[in-house]
Image: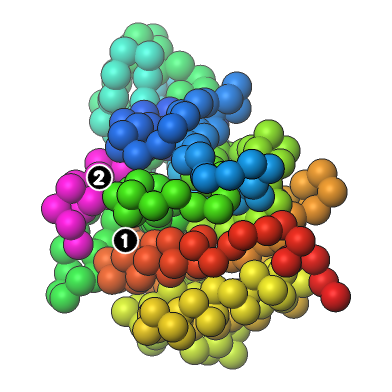
Amino acid sequence: MRKESLKFLEQLLDAPSPSGYEQPAQRVFRDYVAPFCDELTTDVMGNVFARINGKGKNLPRVMIVGHTDEIGLQVKYIDDKGFLYFAAVGGVDAHLTPGKGVNIHTANGVISGVIGKKPIHLMDAKDRETVVKLEAQYIDIGAADKKEAQKFVRVGDAVTFVSSFTRLQGDRVASRGFDDKAGCFVVAEVLRLVAASGKKLAVDLYGVSSVQEEIGMRGGTTSSYTVNPDVGICVEVDFATDQPDVDKKHNGEVALGKGPILARGANINHHLFELLSKTAEKEKIAIQHTSAPRGTGTDANVMQISRGGVATALVKIPLRYMHTTVETISLGDLQEAAKLIVAALAKISSREEFIPQ
């Protein structure tokens, strides 16, 4: 991967962005894409829109979206001893949180903390087999009491898990937040590659970094309404099934390093799916497939039914260990996803071609 692109990816992953608190990551996105676009704006929700103008008049609008928000926690209550109780932001697994290091994002900067856990020596057999509910877990910041804790932390402060970008073997990397900063990264790389080509597309291209997907696809809903695209491509992550404890019957044959995934189903425009598939074949880009017989649970859902409807596709990045602090991907899959989308964009010339016949 290009050195500058990898640095951007690391900065994006490092920036905190629980749903509703995405702006540190959005600032990283804005700074990176600013040189590549003709217009760069942010709306009241916090969605970022980067536009590259096409050549011609009355061009079809194409929107590519990845969400920048990640799962996290929010401070809900401070007890008399200064321990912080919290609620989940998005799908947080209560199995994984005890013993984790966390960062509390306060008005005066980051405060370190740890999620406490009763020692196994003090637990009876039944407790050892029981998952402690999130509402019973707590964060220890080392405060002596409630009064001291309140000097640093307020109810409502966002919390992220301590995690670092880790290089594994080959091109595999692990971090928190690949869901869906992987998609956000691909959107940025598409903008960069289109700008670097020096060729004007026959579409007006909008690269969107959306917010609040993890709590109901809110940013995808409002950004789709704002852009009013004719064609939309959502870039997301999907469950890899090449780890030992995942059943392939759930999500099909999906592996890291085997290329991006194209979803098929009611959420997906058939012509756009075929355009991406044939483009992959022509460009010799390996792709994988998954089925989505109902909704996809992504921004593609809300994009498809925005206003009068949008021709929608879903390009996914294979991901192991979703919603953990060690989400793992292949860097090559990111690059191939961006390459595929850029090549497909060059083949779009009219909005009518996506209307079913």
Q: In the picture, which quadrant includes the C terminus?
A: bottom right
In the image, residue 172 above or below residue 311: below
In the image, residue 307 above or below residue 329: above
How crowded pointer 2 is (Cα within 10 Å; few <14, some 14-19, many 20+) is rated as some
- Tell me what residue is drawn at x 43 percent, y 32 percent: 38
| Residue 343 spot, x, y in % from top left | 44, 67
Q: Nearer the viewer, mark 2 or mark 1?
A: 2
- Judging by the rendered image, the residue that carries numbered circle 2 is 8
Q: Main secondary structure of the magenta part?
A: helix
Q: Is residue 250 visible?
A: yes
| Residue 322 spot, x, y in % from top left | 44, 64
Using the image as rendered, state which of residue 55 and residue 102 is in the foreground: 55
Q: Is residue 100 visible?
A: no
Helix, strand or loop at label 2? It is helix
In screen coordinates, is 26 left or right of 310?
Answer: left
| Residue 107 spot, x, y in % from top left | 38, 14
In screen coordinates, is 283 left or right of 214?
Answer: left
Helix, strand or loop at label 1? It is loop
As shown in the figure, which amino acid type bears the numbered disc 1? Val
| Residue 295 spot, x, y in % from top left | 73, 65
Magenta segment = 1-16
How many numbered marks does the figure carry? 2
What number is the disc on residue 204?
none
- Tell me what residue is drawn at x 57 percent, y 50 percent: 203
The answer to whether residue 14 is magenta is yes
- Judging by the rendered image, the residue that carries numbered circle 1 is 326
Using the image as rendered, state which of residue 28 and residue 124 is in the foreground: 28
Sequence-wise, which precedes: disc 2 or disc 1? 2
Q: What is the distance, in whole Å, between disc 2 and disc 1 at their CAs?
A: 19 Å
